[in-house]
Image (spheres, rainbow, N blue to C red):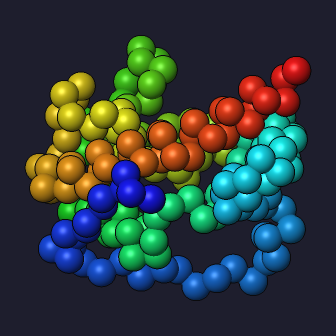
Amino acid sequence: MDRLKLVCHSRRCPRWVAPAPTKEDRQKQLSIIDFVKASTPEGRAELAPRVRDVMRTVWFMCVVNHGLTQSQTECMFEIGDVVFKQVSEEKLQYASKLEEDPTRIGHKPRQVSMTDNRVRDQHEQYAVHRAVFGRKKHPKALEPFLPELRTFAEHNHHEVLHHILRYILETRH
């Protein structure tokens, strides 16, 4: 990927350690979409109906061979950890206004939503717009990493999302 110039300087962050693998066999539940196949017309023809079917049924997939190295992926996890480990009360200033703003940009704490069985969610996130700069301010601890976040967001927008949308469009005929 010539366009991707993600050089991670997050060594200023604590090293991210992946959690232990689950004992459950989740691979059977997760659709793997391999973008290596996207390099040929035959591969794209094979991927298009698979992506369409996954998006119609589960709305979630694991994309592999998307152009990021393992080191770049780990870098993003390290930067992501900054929001959850180095930012505390400051998160409240960046709370997303879910009722007013459907973009969900900002911090969403745990237990804001309820599941269908009336259980509070355990999902916490900090969402940014793909442009990263300009629309909103970010926690101070995250500011040094905004260039990496922008590069990562642009890569995912242009090199992953565009492909997925193209596959869905191709199967609408």
In the rendered image, which quarter is residue 12 located in? bottom left
In the picture, the quarter occupied by the C terminus is top right
In the rendered image, which quarter is residue 126 located in? top left
Residue reaching furthest front?
41
Q: Position of residue 155 (x, y in %)?
A: 42, 48
Q: How many marks?
A: 0
The image shows residue 94, relative to residue 102, as above or below, that is below
Q: Residue at x 46, y 64 (%)?
A: 68
Q: Position of residue 31 (x, y in %)?
A: 79, 58
Decide if residue 54 is in sight here: no
In the picture, the quarter occupied by the N terminus is bottom left
53 vs 162, left or right, is right
Q: Residue at x 46, y 75 (%)?
A: 70
The image shows residue 125, relative to residue 62, as above or below, that is above
Q: Nearer the viewer, residue 115 or 26?
A: 26
Q: Position of residue 108 (x, y in %)?
A: 41, 40
153 vs 89, left or right, is right
83 vs 51, left or right, is left
Q: Position of residue 95 (x, y in %)?
A: 31, 34
Q: Residue at x 79, y 29 (%)?
A: 170
Q: Nearer the viewer, residue 53 or 168?
A: 168
3 vs 114, left or right, is left
Decide if residue 8 is in sight here: yes
Q: Residue at x 63, y 41 (%)?
A: 163
Q: Nearer the viewer, residue 56 or 158?
A: 158
